[in-house]
Amino acid sequence: MRIHFKASVFILALSSTLATFAAANGAWLKNVSAHDHERTNPYKDQPDAIAGGKRIFEQNCSPCHGKNAEGTKKRPPLRSERVQHEATDGDIHWLLVNGNMRKGMPSWAKLPDQQLWQVIAYVKSLGQ
Amino acid sequence: MDIAPSAALPPPPDSALLHVVATILKRKMQRALARQNSALYHCLTLLVATELQYEWNMKKLAAICLFGLFLGVRAEAQERPYFVTYSHEMEEPGNLDIEFFSVNGKPDSANRFVGSNIEFEYGVKAWWTSEFYLDGQMTQHDSAIFTGFRWENRFRPLLREHWINPVIYVEFENTSADKALREVVGHDGAADFVDPNAIARLDKEREIETKLILGSNYKGWNFSENIIAEKNLAGDPWEFGYALGASRPLGLTASAHDCTFCREKFQAGVEMYGGLGDTYSLGTHLTSHYAGPTINWIAPNGVTLSFSPQFGLNDYSIPRLYRVGVSYEIDQFFSRFHRGSAQ
């Protein structure tokens, strides 16, 4: 009975670890609906909107993702291939609204939609 | 930096000891302030020194707010302007939010009072926020007392954003003679404020409070509904209450340049709350209800200042309440203690 219990705990720990790695590898992208995936950024390439997005980024995102989106010890960079090229603006908007709470990424739905798009415009501008 | 309000006003003659304690505390904090240009130190210095040295009244609260307008420190937090209602939004993981709330009221047949609490809100996980409160109150022509503590936890069971987002709230509180009015339940009303503090504090309230928080965000608006059930562990019946809030930032887009009084820095809304009786007498008979506009402003240094005049909606309520809040959020609090941290 005791062995069964230990085995269950081990399997549980292993599966949660694997789930964590899966999420870190961009598994969230699979959860984005086609509708959200195709959404376009109304502020794309607009210098004023990007400047505003930079301000929002510095206030809310940089404590975890680094001042220049280079990432920190525990949180991923946003200059990565996945963020800059694999994920569409709509994908990132979906992530900001819903978060990835198991991985520590909170929902930013408390920010107005306009400001979320501004942040995305700024983050995407870092890869250009 | 000098603390203008406390230097300008003489202390009352019966608070010599408090004056000495406050002066020592103030000097210590001023030294810390000189080392770190932090909003936290500004706020705590001002609030603690002022509260210890002087009786509170609205003029002094206003002086604190005005002083806060000119603080020259930096950081930022997005807060809903609610005082009683909880939204479904959680504290960001790792962030520590330090908040000071105060309510000033004058029941018809009792002395004016100021109930205050200081809160430490920490984001444990993205779906779990924990908060610790220290409560106190001051009643005119009576005394100032520490009234107890509260510890609350909020859990978000659904990990994605929906039309309506539930949050489960559980709190334990150990208070007596509390006048912070952070919730109104059961048959709470103006009559509860009549007893002098010496008598009121004999009534210990060890309570479990639960809330179902429902929240929605739509086109910049936030709509929040709280259903409250509270139980005194001494055996009283369950008491019920509600709180409702709606708010919106005045500006939805972020301006390209730093600004102080631009619309995005303000959030305004309305809040309404009240009691719904208890298990023996459920309903609105002999219950108090309040409603009022509410607004907050994020100062350039990141301190959020909130204000709300609230009005009792029936004779059982206190006619008017004035609520003031000051909060400051410290990003990634514990990582600041790590060597080689990104902070």
Image (tube, coloured by chain):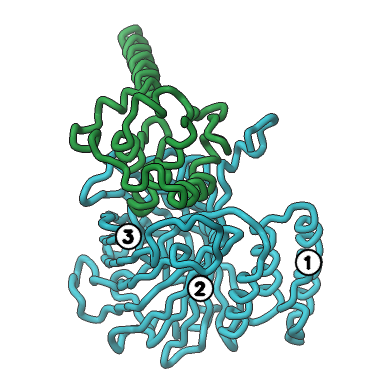
Chain colours: A green, B cyan
Q: Can you see residue B117?
A: no
Amino acid beneath label 3: Lys
Q: Position of residue A16 (x, y in %)?
A: 35, 20
Marks 1/3 in contact by CB < 8 Å: the verdict is no
Sequence-first disc among 2 and 1: 1
Q: Which mark is residue B231?
A: 3
Q: Nearer the viewer, mark 1 or mark 3?
A: 1
Residue density around tag 3, few if under 14, some if 14–19, many if 20 or more, within 10 Å: many
Residue density around tag 2, few if under 14, some if 14–19, many if 20 or more, within 10 Å: many
Q: Quadrant of residue B222?
A: bottom left
Residue furthest out toward the top: A3
Which chain hosts label 2? Answer: B
Viewer-closest of B270 and B129: B270
Residue density around tag 1, few if under 14, some if 14–19, many if 20 or more, within 10 Å: few
Same-chain status of marks 2 and 3: yes
Residue at horizontal 77 percent and vertical 55 percent from the top: B32
Amino acid beneath label 2: Val
Q: Which residue is mark 2?
A: B324
Q: Nearer the viewer, mark 2 or mark 3?
A: 2
Above or below — where is B211 with respect to A32?
A: below
Q: Position of residue B94 (x, y in %)?
A: 52, 40
Marks 1 and 3, how far apart in space? 47 Å
Q: Secondary structure at mark 2?
A: strand
Marks 2 and 1, how far apart in space? 24 Å
Which chain hosts label 3? Answer: B
Viewer-closest of A50 and B177: A50
Same-chain status of marks 1 and 3: yes
Q: Which residue is mark 1?
A: B1
